[in-house]
Image (cartoon, grey):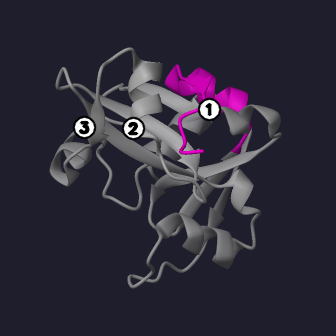
Amino acid sequence: MTPAIVLLQKKRVEHSVLKYEHDANAASFGLEAVEKLNLNADTVFKTLVVSTDNNKLAVAVVPVNSKLSEKKMAKALGVKKVEMAQPNAVMVATGYVLGGVSPLGQKKRLASVIHKSAESLSTIHVSAGKRGLEVALAPADLAFLISAQFEDISVS
């Protein structure tokens, strides 16, 4: 049981957990989940952690088939610049290993932004906090639990 799943159960948020056999050689963890769980790629979101120009970490939740726009993410956070966070900093702040970072149940509460495309979906899939484990839930529930805003944060 991961911290993400524990949080969902504790808050009584409707969700479902999906498991698949993770391949350590997979090029993309998110696309692997799409393929192995036979999901629509538009509903599967990856969790990325960025470092801001004022040395704070923040979370971006974007579709697995898109690329994060660091410029748009910086604007959404109200800072001048962001860059991908160092792997060790990600693990320390979230408690999760790369490829299994969930936006839910992180050790430290980080500012979070979810890509605006999630708002129109009834269900999205995000990492449940372990490689090979996804959780399906309503985007509004995710946004509420992580105090996130919806913004266009991907490259056009």
Which mark sits nearer the N-terminus, 3 or 2? 2
Q: Which residue position holds label 1? A: 142
Asked which secondary structure carries label 1, the reply is helix
The reply to whether dot 3 and dot 1 touch (C-beta < 8 Å) is: no
Which mark sits nearer the N-terminus, 1 or 2? 2
Q: Which residue position holds label 3? A: 93
Report the magenta residues as a range: 137-156
Give the class, few, some or many, for how many residues have Cα within 10 Å of label 1's Cα (few <14, many ≥20). some
**Three-letter residue code for mark 1:** Leu
Distance between the Cα atoms at labels 3 and 1?
A: 19 Å
Instruction: State whether residue 111 is above or below residue 32.
Output: above
Q: Toward the viewer: 139 or 42? A: 42
**Three-letter residue code for mark 2:** Glu
136 displayed left or right of 82: right
Asked which secondary structure carries label 2, the reply is helix
Q: Toward the viewer: 135 or 8? A: 135
Instruction: State whether residue 75 is above or below residue 38.
Output: above
The reply to whether dot 1 and dot 2 touch (C-beta < 8 Å) is: no
Distance between the Cα atoms at labels 1 and 2?
A: 22 Å
**Residue at horizontal 39 percent and vertical 85 percent from the top:** 25
Give the class, few, some or many, for how many residues have Cα within 10 Å of label 3's Cα (few <14, many ≥20). some
> Is 105 included in the stretch rendered in magenta?
no
Q: Percent from the top left, x then y, of residue 98?
A: 33, 59
User: Which numbered disc covers residue 70?
Assistant: 2
Q: Percent from the top left, x then y, of residue 155?
A: 54, 45
Asked which secondary structure carries label 3, the reply is helix
**Residue at horizontal 75 percent and vertical 73 percent from the top:** 38
**Three-letter residue code for mark 3:** Ala
